[in-house]
Image: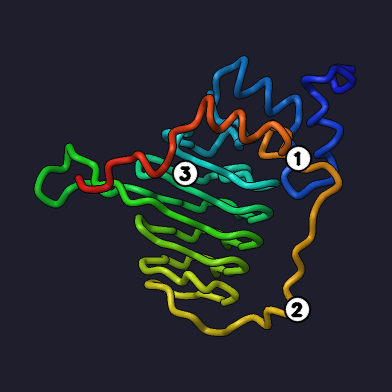
Amino acid sequence: MLSVLPMFRFDKETRQTQTPATIDAWFRQYVLGINRGAYWPVNRSSQVVDWRKIHIGVETSPGFSSGCYIQGIGGIEIGDYTQIAPNVAIISANHSCYDNRVHEPRKVTIGKYCWLGFGCVILPGVILGDFTIVGANTTVTKSYPDGHCVLVGSPARQVSKLEEAKCVRHKSTHEYHGFIPARKFDEFRRKYLIDLNEIDHDH
């Protein structure tokens, strides 16, 4: 019944999407406090760090699947309709080699319509272009900004290119950034999220 209330329209309007935002997920995060603050649905077994430095696209919910670790210290930006499998780690800061109390932030950027496979790891400073497919248990240590490729291995290597003409840029009827309607996301971002250009990446 709550889904008829305007504030809970996301429950009905995202139901047929790849990452539905449910009232149960909202209650778990905003009332029970599990992954509190994250503005998208996160599995109870996943962990999100520094959610204000994580900017997600439409229908993109890092940690929606189980066992993920999403660390936003250095900033994470993920494009629309990118899907993320269980046990994925996205890490935007490492400890200093000289002082392990200190984090060295480096922004991670992931494009639109990407697919991060089971157990893969995206390390600080990596840029992945649109339609990048990262295979299971792959560790991505360097950037592939042109996208349209398949990466496998540890460290990752490109094993094939996708034909751009065949890549489908689909859209859902109702577009949401997690629990936030797309039409309201710019306002939400300005009010609650940290501008990733303002993060100090020199230390």
Q: Position of residue 91 (x, y in %)?
A: 39, 50
Mark 1 or mark 2: name the one nearer the start of the chain.
1
- Picture residue at 79% right of the left edge, 23% below the top: 8
Q: Position of residue 27 (x, y in %)?
A: 68, 20
- Report which quarter residue 148 is drawn in: bottom right
Identify which amino acid the numbered label 1 is placed on.
Answer: Pro
| Image side of residue 133 versus residue 164, left or right | left
- Picture residue at 46% right of the left edge, 47% below the top: 76
Instruction: Check contact, mark 1 vs mark 3: CB within 8 A.
Output: no
The residue singled out by tag 3 in the image is: 70
| Marking on residue 20 | 1
Q: CA distance from mark 1 to mark 3?
A: 19 Å
Q: Position of residue 134 (x, y in %)?
A: 54, 68
Closer to the camera, 41 or 65?
41
Q: Residues within 10 Å of mark 2 (few under 14, many from 20)?
A: few
Front disc: 2 or 3: 2
The residue singled out by tag 2 in the image is: 166
